[in-house]
């Protein structure tokens, strides 16, 4: 279109061929230059190529159309031409280059009688503008302007002229600027700057110039903010932006341009001012307050035109956000509270008045120092590093007190820390009510029902501590948590033993939980140590001969290999050396077999008569004929006849065998000593009562080891307790429920005798299911059968076979021992009702059921309660020099003007790898939230009484959900924003719902409306009925942009 002379300067308008214009060094018309704002210095300098025709190669448009299209398509250059007065009307003087391009040829394009071109009329129905132009050197003496008032012509003074701007014609001749009835009613109509391509240099001054006219800006602000289109899982961003856009002083700070004075582009912790600028632009876009400066947003694929419909596509803001915060790049799901936290922090850093932050060590409150002094000192220290208007709006102060739990330390650390939001727990949401049946150690006490509350992230050990506190009060003595063991009882059988380290989640609400008090571990340790002192596990030496020579002595490593070579059953030796697969009695029996074999070998013919006389002493009971018979065999012959050993054929090999046997004996002693030491804290046994008729004769089948008769018992015994001693221990525990027939008094002697007549069996490991498990084995000298052989009352003695065996190595820890009672004992002696009776079955008030509603005040009070830190969040005590589970308590010291309350609805357990959402309804007041009792420091001027103006809602769960927002308009009516959809006049009862996630409160001394508020522009035409839902944007955009599930 334009002349291509060498002396012209090229400036791109579109990606298509360029327009060229000449910019003179000095303008003859300063007024024209001021109006067109850094455009071409003189309209004469703009010349077109020779031979081009109006309406064929180019069109002329007025200022409104140029303003609209330049912002829409990101054009930066305008070519103005003067409008001159003719005898019969007006015309536009266009300069054309001659064929030789040495001279200028002027042509006049007549204007229609209406005063504007066809493309100008549609835009003028919505917008008005006035351009004051100065005279130029080559304009006629009489120059008048066209008014944009309804297309009429009004002549101006002779000092002014009218400019019409050139625009290349559309490639599609059907393209026209249609009349858009949905244009923003409050859109600005000021002239768009021409030729402004340096955004960074000119932005601040132009913004400030326009923003200073705050009254005009407020007069044209829309009644409702625009909806925000869902760009793809961005509802979390939309709901937060709507709440912040209705935070009046915060919004006014950015819309008015006041933030530009505080913009800190050199802050390395900020975004170089980019996010703050994009946020201010977005607020202006949402409220229809469009900036006079043409933003160069093409590098960020800028969002929609300055003159958009009610739906705003915040693409530029989203891209700038992702540029500086990688977690928000793309279109993944995010948390609205996390986004609000980052956004406020980034805006604070962008507008931080502190350019160079000094290093300041965080100070603790000194001993005896007043709270007000320590708090003010901490406040001033924080302002030395962080000072912005954002902090003035949102920052409060909390008092944090941490105390070491050690009684010898008791160190207390108190600090005063700033906060920009309160993340409060929902009372009861993280607590779990558990009911257990406590079985006391005292046999005279009945089972007691205990109700406790414990954190859902807690452990069984935490449950034991709470049970120990209540049980100590009930029993009148101190009970330690380490002396408690919780089980799940199913069909009179202990189904699961819970370890103290287990998560509390393992204990289900449907489990029948029994917590047993056991003998204190300290008593078991003392008993074990006393036994080890008086009973040494020494086995007499088996050596008959001198040690073998050095060249034949097996090493400490290969004596097992050598012994395995001479043992016929090598698997048996491996089993005996494994403490998990054998017991001490098995090893002693094997040692006796070794001893008999060695004795017989020394009687063989390999040894001379003299050697026999010296090595073998024949007692009075010795059968001389047998000895003479043994002497007829050699060692090799006797070894071939042995059922246990082999490959021993000479005295030398016998000496090596003796050495290996001695090593085996020493190993057996060490294993037994180690076992006793390992079980010094005791061995826990489950005691189950069974009817003898249920057991099949001689089979000890799994059937008999399953079905119990009544509630089982749990005991802890010393590793030195024998089977016979176990009978005495159980007799004491059953004294209250085992009584002589027709007698109500307790008789320990009767129960002890009765217990000696009861057969016992055991399972080494507990059975975890009813379908399979280890078979029962007999324990002690009594056997069970269906004929009831022991009904004659024969009692076992301690020296009977099996009665002297240690119980711990046989049954094992957490093993099960069954007592098989006859029908006669169950009917006449056992008081089953007394044994199963439970006391304290009444539930406390808090355990009867959770309240349907919880107030936000209760949430804040729970936040301020004293709590003990979890093991995963321990505190380092610099006095104890270790990490401890300290007690911590927060207190609200200073309340912020704008209070953001985050309800912790999402729960994630790192140990259990489980996520869940808390759907509890939290009742929060829309007006009059009084925190006077919770806040320590306040005056009458800043009394902490708050009114709600915004609510961020979350629907769904962690797998997929959607965010919406309720906001309070300045007319006192609640509005509902669901991305692009806007619903007005919402009932207050709808605002308070279980979906409420983040609450926005303003203190009552904070202004709710902007100062000097003028009459606002009416909403768009489609919003005539204020009670009807308002859908922002056209239907097609709404359908495409709305993504209900993020």
Image (cartoon, rainbow, N blue to C red):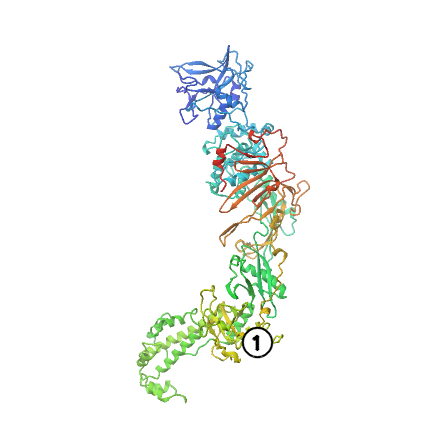
Q: Is residue 363 above or below residue 1011?
A: below
- Is 257 or 697 nearer to us in this picture? 697
The N terminus - image quarter: top left
Q: Is residue 453 above or below residue 228?
A: below
Task: List x then y, in percent, for residue 10.
Answer: 42, 23
User: Is 338 displayed left or right of 660 in the figure?
Assistant: right
Q: Which residue is denoted by mark 1 in the rendering? A: 751
Task: List x then y, in percent, for residue 431.
Answer: 57, 54
Residue at the location (52% across, 24% down)? 191
Whether residue 475 is visible, yes or no, is yes
Residue 624: quadrant of the picture: bottom left
Residue 215: quadrant of the picture: top right
> Alpha-carbon neighbours of circle 1 within 10 Å: few (<14), some, or many (≥20)?
many
Task: List x then y, in percent, for residue 258.
Answer: 57, 33
- Is 990 or 161 nearer to us in this picture? 990
- Residue at the farthest top position: 87
Residue at the location (46% across, 33% down)? 301
Which structural element holds mark 1? helix
Q: Is residue 978 above or below residue 917?
A: above
């Amino acid at each position: 279109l334009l002349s291509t002379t060498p002396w012209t300067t090229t400036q791109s308008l579109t990606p298509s061929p360029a327009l060229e214009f000449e910019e003179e060094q000095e303008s003859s018309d300063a007024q024209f230059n001021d109006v067109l704002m850094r455009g071409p210095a003189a309209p004469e300098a703009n010349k077109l190529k020779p031979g081009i025709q109006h309406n064929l190669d180019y069109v002329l448009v007025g200022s409104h159309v140029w303003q609209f299209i330049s912002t829409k398509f990101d054009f930066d250059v305008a070519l103005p031409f003067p409008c001159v007065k003719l005898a019969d009307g007006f015309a536009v003087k266009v300069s054309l280059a001659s064929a030789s391009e040495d001279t200028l040829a002027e042509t006049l394009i007549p204007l229609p009688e209406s005063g504007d071109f066809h493309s100008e009329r549609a835009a003028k129905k919505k917008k008005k503008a006035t351009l004051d132009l100065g005279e130029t050197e080559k304009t006629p003496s009489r120059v008048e302007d066209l008014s944009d008032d309804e297309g009429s012509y009004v002549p101006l003074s002779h000092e002014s002229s009218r400019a019409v701007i050139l625009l290349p014609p559309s490639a599609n001749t059907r393209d026209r600027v249609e009349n858009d009835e949905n244009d923003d009613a409050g859109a600005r109509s000021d002239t768009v700057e021409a030729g402004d391509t340096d955004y960074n240099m000119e932005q601040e001054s132009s913004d400030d110039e326009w923003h200073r006219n705050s009254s005009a800006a407020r007069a044209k602000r829309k009644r409702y903010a625009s909806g925000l289109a869902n760009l793809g899982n961005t509802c979390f961003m939309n709901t937060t932006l709507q709440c912040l856009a209705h935070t009046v002083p915060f919004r006014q700070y950015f819309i008015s341009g006041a933030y530009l004075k505080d913009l800190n582009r050199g802050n390395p912790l900020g975004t170089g001012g980019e996010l703050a600028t994009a946020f201010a632009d977005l607020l202006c876009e949402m409220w229809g307050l469009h900036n006079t400066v043409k933003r160069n947003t093409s590098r960020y694929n800028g969002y929609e035109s300055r003159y958009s419909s009610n739906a705003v596509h915040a693409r530029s803001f989203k891209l700038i956000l992702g540029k500086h915060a990688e977690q928000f790049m793309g279109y993944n799901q995010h948390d609205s509270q996390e986004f609000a936290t980052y956004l406020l922090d980034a805006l604070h850093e962008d507008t931080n008045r502190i350019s160079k932050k000094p290093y300041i060590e965080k100070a603790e409150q000194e001993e005896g120092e007043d709270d007000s002094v320590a708090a003010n000192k901490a406040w001033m220290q924080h302002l030395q590093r962080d000072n912005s208007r954002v902090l003035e709006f949102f920052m409060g102060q909390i008092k944090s007190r941490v105390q070491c739990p050690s009684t010898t330390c008791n160190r207390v650390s108190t600090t005063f820390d700033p906060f920009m939001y309160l993340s409060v727990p929902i009372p009861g949401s993280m607590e779990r009510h558990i009911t257990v049946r406590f079985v006391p150690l005292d046999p005279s006490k009945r089972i007691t029902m205990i109700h406790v509350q414990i954190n859902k992230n807690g452990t069984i050990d935490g449950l034991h501590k709470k049970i120990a506190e209540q049980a100590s009060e009930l029993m009148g003595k101190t009970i330690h948590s380490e002396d408690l063991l919780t089980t799940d009882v199913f069909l009179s059988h202990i189904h699961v033993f819970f370890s103290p380290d287990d998560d509390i989640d393992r204990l289900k609400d449907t489990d029948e939980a029994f917590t047993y008090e056991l003998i204190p571990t300290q008593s078991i340790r003392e008993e074990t140590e006393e036994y080890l002192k008086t009973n040494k596990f020494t086995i007499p030496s088996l050596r008959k001969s001198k040690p073998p020579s050095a060249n034949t002595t097996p090493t400490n490593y290969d004596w097992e290999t050598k012994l395995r070579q001479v043992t016929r059953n090598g698997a048996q030796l491996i089993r005996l050396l494994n403490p998990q697969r054998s017991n001490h009695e098995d090893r002693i029996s094997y040692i006796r077999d070794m001893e008999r074999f060695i004795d017989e070998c020394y009687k063989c013919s390999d040894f001379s008569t003299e050697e026999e006389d010296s090595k073998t002493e024949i007692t009075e009971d010795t059968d001389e004929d047998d000895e003479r018979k043994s002497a007829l065999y050699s060692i090799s012959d006797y070894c071939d006849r042995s059922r246990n050993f082999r490959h021993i054929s000479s005295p030398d090999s016998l000496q090596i065998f003796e050495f290996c046997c001695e090593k085996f004996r020493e190993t057996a002693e060490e294993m037994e000593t180690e076992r006793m030491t390992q079980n010094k804290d005791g061995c826990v046994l489950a005691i189950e009562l069974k009817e003898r008729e249920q057991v099949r004769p001689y089979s000890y089948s799994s059937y008999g080891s399953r079905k119990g008769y009544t509630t089982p018992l749990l005991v802890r015994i010393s590793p030195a307790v024998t089977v016979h001693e176990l009978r005495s221990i159980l007799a004491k525990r059953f004294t209250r429920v085992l009584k002589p027939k027709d007698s109500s008094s307790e008789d320990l002697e009767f129960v002890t005798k009765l217990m000696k007549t009861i057969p016992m069996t055991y399972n080494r490991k507990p059975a975890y299911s009813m379908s399979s498990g280890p078979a029962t084995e007999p324990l002690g000298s009594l056997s069970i059968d269906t004929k009831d052989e022991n009904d004659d009352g024969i009692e076992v003695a301690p020296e009977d076979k099996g009665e002297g065996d240690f119980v711990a190595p046989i049954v094992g820890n957490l093993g099960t021992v069954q007592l098989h009672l006859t029908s006669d004992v169950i009917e006449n002696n056992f008081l089953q009702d007394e044994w199963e009776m439970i006391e304290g079955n009444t539930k406390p008030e808090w355990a009867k059921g959770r309240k349907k509603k919880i107030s936000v005040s209760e949430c804040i009070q729970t936040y301020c309660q004293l709590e003990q830190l979890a093991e995963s969040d321990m505190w380092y005590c610099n006095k104890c020099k270790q990490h401890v589970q300290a007690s911590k308590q927060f207190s609200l010291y200073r309340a912020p003007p704008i209070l953001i309350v985050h309800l912790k609805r999402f729960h994630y357990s790192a140990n259990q790898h489980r996520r869940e959402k808390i759907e509890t309804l939290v009742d929060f007041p829309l007006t009059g939230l009084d925190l006077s009792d919770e806040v320590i420091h306040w005056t009458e001027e800043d009394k902490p009484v708050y009114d709600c103006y915004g609510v961020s809602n979350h629907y769904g769960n962690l797998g997929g959900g959607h965010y919406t927002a309720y906001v309070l308009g300045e007319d006192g009516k609640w509005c509902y924003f669901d991305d692009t959809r806007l619903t007005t006049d919402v009932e207050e009862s709808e605002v308070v719902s279980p979906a409420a996630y983040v609450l926005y409160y303003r203190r009552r001394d904070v202004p709710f409306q902007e100062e000097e508020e003028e009459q606002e522009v009416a909403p768009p035409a489609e919003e005539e009925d204020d009670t009807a839902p308002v859908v922002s944007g056209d239907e097609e955009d709404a359908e495409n942009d709305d993504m209900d599930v993020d």
